[in-house]
Image (cartoon, helix red, strand yellow):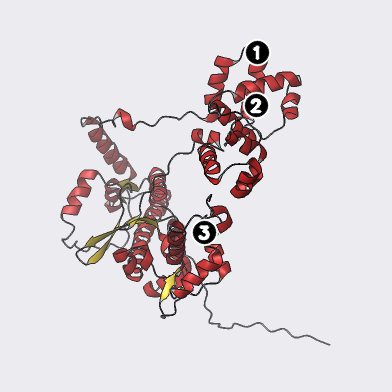
Amino acid sequence: MAIHQKLGLQTRLSQRLILTPSLQQAIKLLPLTTLELAEVLEQEVTENPLLEEVPAQETAAEDAVAEEPAPEPERTEDPLKDIEVEKFFEDYFEDYAERRSRPTEVPEMPPIENTLTESTDLYDHLLWQLRMTASDEITMEIGDAIIQNLDEDGMLRVSLEEIANLGPYPMPEVEKALAVVQALDPPGVATRTLTECLRIQLRVLGLEGSPADLMVRDHMKELQSHQYGEIGRQMGLSPEEVGHHLEIIRHLDPKPGNRYSPDRSAYVLPDVFVVKEGEEYKIVLNDDGLPKLRISPTYRRMLEDKSSGTEETRAYVKDKLRSALWLLKSVDQRQRTIYRVAESIVRHQRAFLDHGVSHLRPLVLRDVASDIGMHESTVSRVVANKYIHTPRGVCAMRFFFHSGITSTMGEAVSSVTIKERIRKMIGEEDGTRPLSDSRIAEILEAEGLPLARRTVAKYREELRIPPSNLRKAVQ
């Protein structure tokens, strides 16, 4: 059986989604914070000679005439044609010599109180004390090994046998070194259990053998489960006496090493400012710290020159020019997109800006995407790692996106608003009769917010509030 094959041409119409290099770059810039974008731009200026930062003096002059319409640039057939390389470098070195001849201004240094210093961590703090305390070399060596095995809470999470095997060291010497380290500041450091940690602190306070010490030693499980009545019954103490000794225990530190944690406070730099002017809200993008870029005038003169140049030079300049234009366009597109998303958020959450968190309405990415005519993924990239400064404080952009429920009055209520209501109810409850999750659900339903008990429990856990049996105060 013969098989016949026939060659021919066919026309087919199809649609494909193609990401151009400029679009890919714009997508990569969207999730970046202002500080991250500044780093990217500085790196691009370093790698691309056609990009340069606009001097501050010229930026101020441009702002002064920003309202005047700029004339349309004349179009040329090929701005890369006929490049004279020798003349370009001659102009470049002339500009460089002129810049070098200008008097250099010495920038004003920041005040000494603003100078950052490295804080002492727990290891350095303990090691300094150990060197002043250890009476012999082996105690110093074992003590250093113990300190190196402390976690960030200051607790010793390895056994003494493991410490002894490091040397190997005799067990009596290990126990001696442990006692030396446990006597250092902060009290309670290098302990192996919570009971041991709290008892050492009570001993430092001169309360060894006191009812508070006996509570920690013999009734830790009851303390953790708030069974204060049972503790009082077993110890023969009245509720007032139990409450007095509990107050002492509450002032002890279960994590003594945390105060020397190297973590610093994180300062948020808002990407967007929402400023109220009269009865309206104005969106202002935060461009502070972002370098304002342009195509280098030196290279612009080079492109305008009609002299001949090598093909290799023309290809290099053309590639760098294309890359610079893509970057400038991508940055501009990023700023426009952030502005539109912030503007839509303000429209949707106007009640929050006017009255506070109790008026925050449910909002999802789809709502903003439909409002500004963009895809949900684009909105998701914009709100990632971004912060917005509002009259109600600095908020993450994702703070405004929450699910919600419909009240019995037909109004949409945000889950954030419900959580805030739960927090307020628990904060105002009677400590001797704390509200259960079921009771909170009943109160919310009476207020027109039908919620299941398990949903209330979920919201309470997200607020890091313990259940009612652990919130019960001593009677």
Check disc 1 and give the amino acid type. Answer: Glu
Helix, strand or loop status at disc 1: helix
**C-alpha span from label 3 to label 2:** 45 Å
The residue pinned by badge 2 equals: 146
Helix, strand or loop status at disc 2: helix
Residue neighbourhood size for the residue with mark 3, other residues' Cα within 10 Å, grouped as few (<14), some (14–19), many (≥20): few
Label 2 is placed on what type of residue?
Ile
Q: What residue would you read off at disc 3?
A: 433
The Cα–Cα distance between marks 1 and 3, rounded to whole angstroms, is 58 Å
**Residue 399 placed where, x, y %?**
43, 61
Name the residue rendered at 66%, 24% in the picture: 178
Quarter holding residue 68: bottom left
Q: Earlier in the sequence, mark 3 or mark 2?
A: 2
Q: Residue 137 has which mark?
A: 1
Mark 1 / mark 3, whichever is N-terminal = 1
**Residue at left offset 62%, top offset 20%:** 180
Q: What percent of the width, then of the height, locates residue 390?
A: 31, 58
Q: Which image quarter: residue 389?
A: bottom left
How far is mark 1 from mark 2, CA to CA?
A: 14 Å
